[in-house]
Amino acid sequence: MSWFESFVLGLVQGLTEFLPISSSAHLRLTAAFAGWQDPGAAFTAITQIGTEAAVIIYFRKDIGRIISTWSCSLFNRELRHDHDAQMGWLVIVGSIPIGVLGITLKDAIEGPFRDLRLIATTLIVMGVVLGIADRLAARDETGGRHRAAKQRKTLTDLSVKDGLLYGVCQAMALIPGVSRSGATISGGLLMGYTRESAARYSFLLAIPAVLASGVYELKDAGEGHVSWGPTVFATVIAFVVGYAVIAWFMKFISNKSFMPFVIYRILLGIALFALVAAGTLTPHAGETAG
């Protein structure tokens, strides 16, 4: 991998990780369209460490408070009913599904799941799901001619059951094209949470899973066509760009719809199917190119 390729892929990772459009799919598609070799699951997982570092810094006050209160609650019973202590347990519980499935499906994630036809399918299907979830949230928030606005849940209402459901949604993002933020935010909206609450828990929930995955894949870094230098460079680029994107996204969702992302996902999926059908791209384009 050249330094230019690592710069572009780091930029793509930072731009797409927090948006509900799938960073892994865009890394895969960027390589396919450019005629580069697929950077692979290890490169993707390691560069995500950069974007998760951006999450840790952006939410540092929340994270520090949760870790501190959760740790103290292990020895102080009175703190076990505190919201921050409960959030610590809920993040742990919600991380279980992706941990189990990530290890179980490792070979599929690095192989069949990277087929462009599957990516096109997940882009479209999850785009439709996000659109439905967004419409339901908008209906609750605004009400209508014959119905009053409905109060949506916040993170103070988060239960173990909902935390596990969030975790199952996050695990779906093991398939490129689903999108970690897209799946968890959609799940949160369908469970009745506000956009801001769904996104906030989505980002907090991703930290253990992404960091664990990145550290696990470190052993494979530097193998094949992707060396250590470009991988680290891409991770740094992803961090810088990712921090800017998450700051913008949290402001955007406070009063905007997810429909632009829904439309983008569906159009990209259709275009990808058309390119594969026309023979412009093969289902495994990029896997042996370079």
Image (cartoon, rainbow, N blue to C red):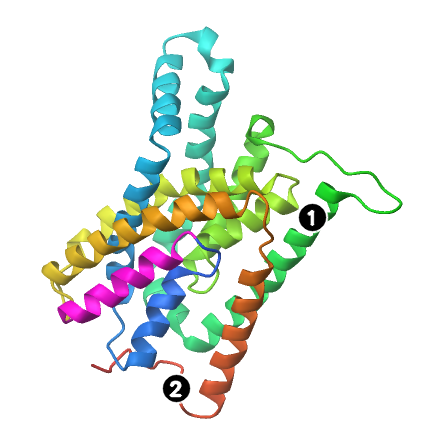
Which numbered disc, 2 or 1, marks the residue that appears first in the sequence?
1
Within the image, what quadrant is residue 89 found in? top left
* Residue at the image position 63 percent from the left and 59 percent from the top: 131
Q: Is residue 217 magenta?
A: no
Mark 2 → mark 1, Cα distance in angstroms: 38 Å
- Label placed on residue 281: 2
Question: Looking at the picture, which amino acid does disc 1 mark?
Answer: Ala
* Residue at the image position 47 percent from the left and 43 percent from the top: 250
Question: Looking at the picture, which amino acid does disc 2 mark?
Answer: Leu
Most common SS among magenta residues: helix
Q: Nearer the viewer, mark 2 or mark 1?
A: 1
Whether residues under marks 2 and 1 lie with C-beta atoms below 8 angstroms apart, the answer is: no
Quadrant of the snapshot with the N terminus: bottom left
Across and down, in percent, residue 175 comes to 44, 62
Within the image, what quadrant is residue 43 found in? bottom left
Across and down, in percent, residue 45 comes to 28, 55
Give the secondary structure at mark 2: loop
Tell me the magenta residue range.
1-18
| Crowd class of label 2 (few under 14; some 14 to 19; many from 20; radius 10 Å) | some
* Residue annotated with mark 1: 138
Instruction: Tell whether 264 sits left or right of 216.
Output: right
